Every structure is written in structure tokens, then in C-alpha cells.
Image: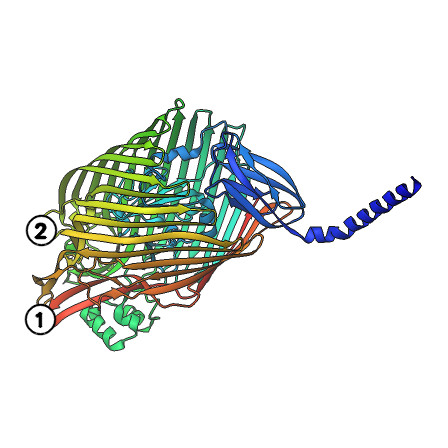
Amino acid sequence: MENYLKSSKLKRSIIAVFTVLMLPLLSMAQFSISGTVSEKSNQVLPGASVRLKNKGTGLTSDAHGQYRFNNLKAGNYVLIVSYIGYRSTEKAVSLNADAVVDITLAPAAFLADEVIVRATRANEKSATTYKNIGKKEIEENNFGQDLPFILNNTPGVVVTSDAGAGVGYTGIRIRGSDASRVNVTVNGIPYNDSESQGTFWVNMPDFASSVDNIQIQRGVGTSTNGAGAFGGSVNIQTASVADQAYAELNNAYGSFNTLKNTVKVGTGMIDNKWSFDGRLSRIKSDGFIDRAASDLKSYFLSGAYYGKKDLLRINVFSGQEKTYQAWNGVPEAKLRGDLVALEEHYNNNLGYLYYTDADRANLFNSNNRTYNQFTYKDQNDNYTQSHYQALYARQLNEKFSFNGALHYTDGAGYFEEYKNDQKFSKYGLPDVSVGGSPISKTNLVRRRWLDNDFYGLTYAFNYVPSSNLNITLGGAYNQYRGKHFGQIIWAQYASTAANDYHYYDGKGNKDDFNTYAKVNYSPVSQLSLFADLQYRNVNYDITGLDKNRNTLDFHNKYNFFNPKVGATYFINQQSNVYASFSVGNKEPNRDDFSNLKAGLPVPKSEHLNNVEAGYRITDKDFNVGINVYGMFYKDQLIFTGEVNDGGDPYRQNVDKSSRMGLEIDGSYSISPKFIINANAALSRNKIKNYIDYVSVYDANFDLINVQATSYANPDISFSPNTVLFGELVYKPLSGFAMALQSKYVSKQYMDNTQNESRKLDAYWVNNARLGYDFNLKGIKNINIGLLINNILDKKYESNGYTYSSIYPWGMLTENFYFPQAGTNFLLSLNLKF
């Protein structure tokens, strides 16, 4: 017995010593925590947020609700798991081996913010081509550039920047369609300008910092509110309730003295009923182009009440921009450094009459790629836009719910410009006499104003009588009241105008009503049928004088019926195929009427038939979407190349045109450290028969005629047939990630003649992004980010324009380009408390 006791003591001693010796090895060992996030009914929750408390490490569950943290040292951890509409939970894990921790979330006691945009969103049953962008991806790519540059990594998207570096005036095209054909909503409320139908992101600086998620639908998509979607739609949901109180400081600095400062605060849920959030931002940049400076300010305030069956959220946000004009581009001769051709450009544009000595010196002596024609110190665009939204949702019972919104947008501002040698008569003013000599022209400074109001309501009723049937009835009624007027604030020779004199006054009044019914029905578990019927009525009156003092008197009424049908077949839980047919209609914009040449027919509305078909597969390590599409237009409005008497280009209806293409979008996790994201858009964009008009002038530069030339089956302008994107993400350490991004855009023609001398060359641009997350005592998370754009210093132009004229000595064609910046960087430091 004594020997046995001695033996047992010896074994315990050996085990204890062995354990002590192994502790350093155990602490160095690498383990994992994985599991599945689901609700009480065992329904998995894809996209749930899972993070390690105080570790600065987080991820989202995959399509099967699964998550996995790798390369963790032994020790104690706390998992924090959250999902919209469910109560967040924390779970302690003592890790000394690979652990499987399944999480079950209970429904929250309040209605989730996602119901606000549900009626206008597509899902896997909608037979629609779409892309969802979550908050994490938005944050990773948000260094202060405008929202289009955050969306640049999505299929078929091409972006451009007037100032060359993504701050200030920026543009976006989807499937070759410009911003006036891309429907944008914020919480289901239309954002496109009612008259131009464009979207001016410069009026919403740093708005991405207040965005929770974005859905891009390509093609006609599902019925939404506002302008017709002829290229796609961008559906934005602003920030939803945070898990807990927070404060953030987000700062960035980089090339061209670009500076971003953002402060964000939020209360989280108070008493399980209330939440308040706020943001204050400023962005300043000198721009890549000479004098293309931007001074942007914005704020976002939001308060919400959450009940068990209802939700009320009030949003107030505003943006103020002061942007030096860089929208004339660089003449081709200047860009190419051809001094002989540049002298010809100067003479052809009567530089000796309209250019000052300083203008000529600027044209010939400035940098070829950063030249800006404007030199007047206050050649600025100034605009303030404020938005007020009241969003309400109520779950009436288990099957029936409602959400609606009241909104008001107030916009006012002007752009100021210096003009040489202007005739008094052009401004409705009499000539003057100086020292007894008649004076009919003067140098002056003018402002062109836009003062507008946009208000209305949106609504949607959702009825789910059974698990296989979902019905939505929704719509909107909105009114726009716009005032356009011009003022002269200084003149070298003063005429009879008073300080408050308006040399033109115009109005644009637009009433827009739409209603739609959407139905998802699954006759069998694997098949979902989708139908969406929309009626839209538009009354649009344009009156007064335009900027050239021509009389405007247009009263237009449109009635559109936009049906959409589709089907989705679920092959299994991971994959499905879909097909749809959709109809879109769209009214002309203000310029189509105000720029209309005398004697030409009033522009007709446009019609689009859109066919989409695709295949989607999602697995544990990869997901891929492949779709083909056909967009067949009737009476599409396109620029003809001709200008009116005021020098403004105008569009005309073409009988038949089309866009057809193939799009691929996917990602693949090679390992926990390597991820590949890629997409491709291949397309063919054609006008069946196109007539190009060129103005003919005499030796005195008076318009005498128009020459017409027919073209068979040319490419549609600004429609590259190939757009490719690839991204390699490397995560060597916990909290640290590097990404190499590559974007290729094939050549684009600047008009519809498919002339090789009037094109944007293809370009291939590479960016690199680095991010490191860690924490210190008292700071929840610290993120250091670095974005290096155009790391290979590619010289390229992403936008431009062209026009031609015929004179007794021959045809003159002028091309202008918008060069983009070479290698440049943005460095960010973001603190979360």
C-alpha cells in the first residue's frame, strides 16, 4: 500500500511538471472557434455579425449561418453575436483546443430597420440581377472619396472624377448608362434630381459614413420610386440601431492635400426603445486638376423609437459643397503636348477674341494633364442640400405589415463664372455709352441659380398569408418645384440692371405618382414565381426663359405601365437559376426640351424591354453568379453631335438600340488567409440606324445649314464592351489585411459614329489597400488604413466629350478629356470607443 501511494504521488508530480513545461507550448498553439448561428426554430442566420470582444476581430456568418475564427492562441475569449431583428448575445469560450460553439439568437423585442427598404429590395426569389454591399465592405473602402468610387468594384460599373481623384464632382455608369438612367433611393425615397434625373454625389459628402448597406440592381430591376431605371438602380439604407453606445473618430489625409475628418456618436438602444445617432464630416481637397479644389461639409442626425410592433425613425441630413469648376476638360492637343495643334485649337476657338493674356499663358504653359481652362478665383459651384425623412413601419399582425415615409428636400445654390466680351443684348440689357462712344459688350461675372423643393410620401403594404405567398402593394407621390434664374453680380461696364435683376427666370414643376403590386408565389418548394406591375404618371411643366433667354412653354403628361415577371428555380440549397422579363419607360429630362432646336419635334419618352437570366451558387468557400441580359430600347434618347444656337448639345430619339451582355461575379476563399474577388462584364451595345448631324457655318461663323450622315449599327457612346475587376485579399495576421485591386475598362467612343479618332483609350488601373485593426485600453478598436491608387502610375482618361463643325475651310473636330490622377494615396486613422 505504501509503495502504491508513493507511486501515485510520483505520477501526479510528473504530470504536474509536464503540464507546467507544456503551458508555453499550449499558449503558442493555434486553435479555432467555429459554429453555426441560428434562431430558436433552427433556421440559420446568414450575415450575422460575430466578433471577439476586445480583440478587434470580426466576421459575418456565411450563407449557411456558419462562422470560423482561425489561428487563435489558447486562452479565454468572449464571442459577441448580433443580427438585425434579434437580441445580441455574448458567450464565453475557454480555448485550449479547436472549439465548436453554436449560437442561438432570440427575436428582438422591436421591429428591425430593414423593413424600411424591404418593399424596394430584390432577394433570391425576385429573378433579378443584383449585388448587396454590406457595412463592413463600405467601411473598408471609405477613405473620403465620393460614393461612386466605393461602388467601383461591382460588375459593369465605370466611375470618373472631374477633379481626377474621386473628390468633388464624380460620375458613375452602370452597363454604359449614365447617372440620369440609374435610379437612386435613400431609404426608399427618390434621390435623383427630378429635372435632370442625375445624381450629384458632391451634395452628399461622406454620406457613406452613415450608410448601413446598399443594393445595386442592374437592368430595370424591381419597381421602385422615382426616375426610371434604364441601366440600374442603387438602393441605399442608412445606418440602423447599434448594439451599444459608441463614438468614432475617422480621419484621412493624402495626396493633393485631401483631408477628411468625421465624428460619429450613437447611444445604442436606450431602455430597449430609443436610439440616437449623429455624424459631422468635412472633406477638403486641392484636386489633381489645377484649382479643382473642393470644400465639403455635411451632417447626419437620426433618432428612432422601437416598439414591439412599430418603428418610427426621423432622419435629418445635409451637405454643403463649394467646388471649383473643372468640367470643361483638357483639349486633346493640350493633353498630347502637340504645340502646333494647340495653336490651331486656340485660333479655331477665337482665342484672340475670348481669351485674356492670362488665359493664353495658362493654355500654353500649364501641365498637359492638369490644365484647367478656368482662372477666375471664384469660378465655383456652391450648393446646399438638406433632407428631412420621417420613416414609419408597423407590424399589424403576423401576416400584415405597413411602412411609409414623409420626406422633404430643400436645395439651393449657384455656380459663378467670369465671361469675356458679352453682348448686353444677350442679357436683356440696353447698350451703354462711355465718353460718347457706344458700348455693346462687356466683361462680367454671372451666377446661375437653382432653388428647388422636393417633397412627398412613399408607402408599402406587405401581406404574407402563407409561407409560399408574399404580396406587396406600394407606391409614392412626389412633387418638385424648381426655380432657375441668372444674375449679373459684376460688369466692367454697368448697364441699367439693378442688383436683384434676373436676366432669365425659368420654372420646372413636376408631379410624379406611381403604384405597384409585387407577388412572390411558390407553387412547389423549389420554384418561385415573381410578378411586379407598376403604373407611373408624370406631369411635367417647363415655363419661363432658359439661360439663353429663349421662351420655354412645355406641358408634358406621361402614363407608363411597367410590368415585370420572372421565375427562380432552386436546384438545391446552394444554387438556383432565374429568368425575368421587365419593361421600363422613362420621360425626357429638362435639357431635352430647353436645348431643343427650333423646328425639331418634341422628344418622346423612351421604352425598354429587359431580359435577364442567370445562375447563382453559394458554397462554404465560394460563391458565383453568372447572368446574361438583353436590353432592347425603343426611342432611346442619345446625343447627336449637333448643338443649338447657344452651343448646347441636344439629344434625339433613335428608333431601335440595344445592350446585350454577360456578367460574372464571384469570390473564393482559397484559405483562411487568401480570398479572391472578381467580376467581369462583357457587352455589345449598338444603335441599329444612327444619323449624325454636324452644324455648317459660313466664314462669319453664322450657322447656315446642317449636314447629316447615316451610320449602320455603330456602338453606343461611353459603353465599353469589357469591364473587368479582380481583388486578391491576404490576411497574414489577425486584424491585418492587404488587398490588391485591378480594374480594366476597354475603349469607349465619345460619340455614336464609332470613329477611332473620337474615343477614350482602354485603361488598366491597379490599387492597393491595407488595413490593420487592434485595440488599446479604453479604445474599442483602432484601424489604420492605407489606400494607394494607380500604383503603376497609369496615364488614363475616364471621361470626355467631342463635337464637330463644318466651315468653308473644312471640318473641325474638337475632343476634350478628363485625365485621372497618377499614383496617389490616402492614409486613414479610425478610432472606435
Q: Residue furthest top?
A: 397
Mark 1 burial class by Cα count in 10 Å: few <14, some 14-19, many 20+: few
> Mark 2 highlights which residue?
600
**Residue sitting at x 54%, y 27%:** 271
| Residue 102 pos. (x, y %) | 56, 37
For the residue labelled by badge 1, is the local secondary structure a helix, a strand or a loop?
Answer: loop
Question: In which quarter of the view is residue 470 placed?
Answer: top left
Given residues 91 and 215, the one toward you in this image is: 91
Name the image colouring.
rainbow
Say above or below: 284 vs 755.
above
Q: Which quadrant, please, contains the C terminus?
A: top right
| Residue 354 pos. (x, y %) | 21, 66
Given residues 607 and 2, the one toward you in this image is: 2
Say above or below: 404 vs 657.
above
For the residue labelled by badge 2, is the local secondary structure a helix, a strand or a loop?
Answer: loop
> Mark 1 highlights which residue?
808
Q: Residue furthest bottom?
A: 340
Mark 1: amino acid: Pro
- Does residue 256 appear in the picture of this structure? yes
Say above or below: 31 vs 352.
above
